[in-house]
Image (cartoon, rainbow, N blue to C red):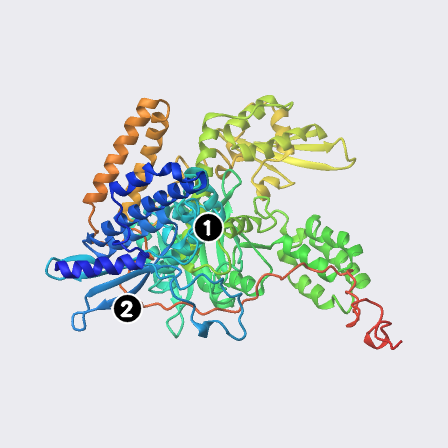
Amino acid sequence: MSSESEDEMDECHGDAFGWNTSDSEWNTSDRENIEENSDLIGPHDCGTMDGMFSNFGKENEAMDEYWEIVQMTFESEEECYSFYNSYAEKKGFSVRKDIVRREKKVGDIFYRRFVCSKEGCRDPAKRDIKDRKRRERAETREHCTAELSIRLDKYRGVWFVDNFLDDHNHTLTSPDGTQYLRSHRRMKDYQKSEIMMYESKGIRKHRIMDVFECTHGDKVGFIKKDIYNFSSRYKRSRIEDGDANATLKVLKDRRDKDPEFFFDYEVDSEGRLKTLFWCDGQSRMDYQSFGDVVVFDSTYRMNRYKMPFVPFVGLNHHRQTVVFGCGIVSDEKVSTYKWLLRTFLRAMCQKKPKSIITDSDNAMIKAIRQILPGTDHRVCSWHIEKNMKKHLHFSYLRLFRSFIYEVCPPDVFEEKWSAFVQKYQTNRNKEWLNRMYKKRRLWAAAFLCGKYFMGMRTNQRSESLNSRLHVHLDGFMSLYDLVQHYEICVSEMRRRESELDTIASQSWPVAVTDCREIEKAAAHVFTFANFELVQEQLHLVSMFDVGEVILDGSRTRYRLISNVIPGREFSVDYTCLGSDSDIKCNCRKIERDGIPCKHIFLVLKHAGMTEIPKCCVLQRVSKNAKAGLPSVRKSDLHVWTKKQSRYHELRSLGSELFDLASGSDDAFVEVKDYLVGQISRHKSSSKPANDAPAHAGEGSRREGAPKTRGSVLDPKCVVTKGAPKGRIKSFDEPPKPRLCSGCREPGHDIRKCPEAQPK
């Protein structure tokens, strides 16, 4: 650049700041002359002169800062933007990228302009929009002229300052407020990793912001809105090739890592995902131990496609929910449930459950009859009670509950039902009562007595899993998120199971009943949850007395008489053949619930036994239920990149180091200086990685690149039977009164409204 052009630039930028360098050349002699004549100047004039010198000093500093900036060169436009943004943060304004110019043939950038965020004005076409659904955003632009323009010097390969103006027509933000301006809200990679980690555990986004404020103080670097935006971009990036394709890819990756992982799916005629089922190796092992009773239920509002979520769950040896598998279906037809049940049996090596619990869905009932004909089936009693409140008067409910819970012979049930129908059947509930009678073998205690359901009458085990999932999910989640959060919920359930296994192996409950020896033996055999049920039966032993003992070869029959309810008797048969023994009670509690009854414990006490026979302890309720096979919790549920995995490992080590170093001043200074040096060294030596970025959603796919063609399309939003909306009205609940359209009061209409009558 020639000296002539430099003089022109000097004059141009001087005018931009409102300075005239020829009129502002103060020298030492001028200053001395003013000081010599200071006695002729009043106190007020002296203060004015001091202010003038102070303003001149500030202008001189601003001029030096200006010349320092216009003489700078940059290696790239990103470096220039970073510098100008840092400069703006100190001054109190925000920066926005504006004009960019490219070479016509090559397309390389040779000019870039950065401006104050208040530059320009809003497009008038966007001001007056009819039928606007959202409130218009507040005005932020005020025609500010501050800018920094750079141009590429092709010969030297550097960017130089083409124009710099620092004249703002608005109030600058205070230093404490610059962190809330848009260009200064920067979310670092490690903060993004923490956000993803917190969100995967079900922590809400506004709570995540509270966590960052606790750990970083006021200098978090971003606001709550940025967390929502990042989370949305990250989730969209994971399914950019299609939600169904991304979900199937995750399941395939799981199968590559776990050979026992199983999944299968169906597509419709359009190639869209129709049904999906999956289970991991641990779920298949759990089914071999606890798959005698299965709860099969569907729930709704779990994904954006409204596809019902169908988990297969059961009860483990700690009486906790254990998951055997999970399905997603597009409809609730008999053929769909038949496919799901066949796939479930194929995953479980064709081992059928002894019993199954479902809701009262007709399609589900028909599918079970065809696929599992020899399996005992019952309908959830909660659904029965819900429907009976809807169809019966409240005064009939107690009598109807006796059909659900009171055990009686089938012929007695038929007599009671006939009497109930003759007395309480109406035109309103006739159809419902007929349906219930046809399904009586699925819900009435008279037909379910003696069948093995582990004491379960409802599908609450499935609901417990659904409630955990609903902590993470809502009706707008993708299938990818559903699979991820499902695995995290299952992992937490297995962690709790592993914890209880450890506690059960290292401790046992204290005996408190009169049957101390038997109780101590039970404490070492049963898990804590099942021991509590055993202990309840031991407390009830005193309610019966041994009335008669009948010997019949190797079998001994004990007749037990109740000392509380006169005339109530039970019989227990005890057979001993060498080391093998068998004991049965006609109450059949052990066959129904898997727990010995009080009658059996009374016989054991009467016989002087101090140990519990093996025939009284089902392996699935004992501490050795899984034969020494522990629950496996997956440690790789999160789809981390290598960088994120390294970060989490270093973070764990760093937290311990920081705690130790914060204990003394010397250690604190030593660690702090070391970290500052390491950060500076790695920042200067870091190079862009060749692989994918650390966080999806930020340049993971180059702009304009075509999407990968997948073999499975996303499902359409389906229409299901759905969960009941709102509160279920009881039979006796009166209808809401009709309100007047004029005064909104009941008892009259607009024609007779007193307010509408002419005066």
Q: Position of residue 222 (x, y in %)?
A: 41, 49
Q: Which residue type does callout 2 highlight?
A: Gly
Q: Position of residue 105 (x, y in %)?
A: 16, 73
Q: Quadrant of residue 358?
A: bottom right
Which mark, by number, is residue 572? none
Which mark, by number, is residue 704? 2
Q: SS for tag 2?
A: loop
Q: SS for tag 1?
A: helix
Q: Position of residue 629 (x, y in %)?
A: 39, 37
Horizontally, is 238 left or right of 361 in the view?
A: left
Q: Label 2: few (<14), some or many (≥20) within 10 Å?
A: few
Tell me: residue 261, above or below residue 426.
Answer: above
The residue at which mark 1 appears reads as 224
Q: Quadrant of residue 191?
A: top left
Closer to the eye: label 2 or 1: 1
Residue 498 in view, yes or no: yes
Location of the C terminus by quadrant is: bottom right
Q: Position of residue 235 (x, y in %)?
A: 39, 57
Q: Label 1: few (<14), some or many (≥20) within 10 Å?
A: few
Horizontally, is 430 left or right of 345 in the view?
A: right
Q: Which residue type does callout 1 highlight?
A: Lys
Q: How far is the residue under mark 2 from the one under mark 1?
A: 30 Å
